[in-house]
Image (tube, rainbow, N blue to C red):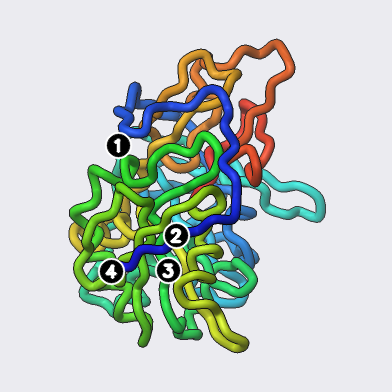
Amino acid sequence: MANIKLKKGFDLKLKGAINADFESKTKISSKICAIVPDDFHGITPRLEKKEGEQVLAGEALYHDKVYDSIKVTSPVSGTVKEVRRGERRKIEAIIIESDNANNAVNHDTNKPTLQVLLDSGLWVMMSQRPYDVVPNPEVRPRDIFVTAFDSAPLAPSMMAIASKKLQYAATGVEALQKLTDGKVHISFKKGEEIEIAGAECHTIEGPHPAGNVGVQIANIAPINKGEVIWTLDIVTLCRIGELFTTGKVSYDTIVALTGEGVATPMCVETTIGCCIADVLNGQVADSGDKRIISGNVLTGKKEEQDGWLHAP
């Protein structure tokens, strides 16, 4: 396992952090969930489901206009309640009313790996560089990079978030290796490193932005002109491994409620796309000069309580 020490950067200390070795405090089940197309860069949606239609967890809501094999799937089973549109009829959100039955698509993992990832919707949770867009399925990447920590202010331990699913990580690596002629690199924070079969593992030391995958790429195997690589995080890697083990996609996630404006900093177990108001659950006062930020304070997006928990 290679050890890389970085000196440039700065760790911004803010109030409202949680313990590194956290335990999830509560579990939130949201009646309404939504998929926001803007979360998936480079895709122009073409709907496969209309308002009022039934949908299973893991079933396609829409596909890409250019590559119709790229699909975005529903995180819950239920009814498509609303296709919310903005200016020029741009789709801003696809809102699903959950039936709380969690009926899910069983994916045929005997199909080619590329096809399974496209059909499952996990494909759009990866990113292609350059340009930071959803990967082109017709381009084979030089390497694939997985980051296993986030060094941003108030960020929780990514390894702690993935801890209950780490048994699927090696299966995820095995699947990704079939999609590249290069290596699957995984970067860990110093003190959180583990060995994962089939992957080229690295330990990173240093201040923020050491956890940014772009910084990790630059210090491990920089991108040259004309090359393409894919990136994802350890949580998505475990989701891929779970898919190829069980045939189903897990949309469960853990969200850290942090910051000075949070009454009790904690972690919440919930579902991708759930309503932010349900996640906050009264933890942030309506009055006062406070902002709700999805993501970290440096690069996150300002949200309202009636917004949605964005996909990775």
Query: Disc 2 designates what residue?
Result: 5
Label 3 neighbourhood size at 10 Å, few (<14), some (14-19), many (20+)? many
Depth order, front residue of 107/184: 184
Q: At 44% from the left edge and 66% from the top edge, which residue is drawn?
A: 123
Query: Disc 1 designates what residue?
Result: 101
**Residue 81 in sight here:** no
Select label 1 or label 4 by which is in front. Answer: 4
Of mark 4 and mark 2, the one earlier in the sequence is 2
Of mark 1 and mark 4, the one earlier in the sequence is 1
Q: CA distance from mark 1 to mark 4?
A: 31 Å
Please, what is the three-letter code of the amino acid marked with disc 4?
Val
Which image quarter: residue 84?
A: top right
Query: Disc 4 designates what residue?
Result: 173
As helix, strand or loop, the secondary structure at mark 4 comes to helix
Up the image or down, 30 lies above or below 211; here it is above
Label 1 neighbourhood size at 10 Å, few (<14), some (14-19), many (20+)? few
Of mark 2 and mark 1, the one earlier in the sequence is 2
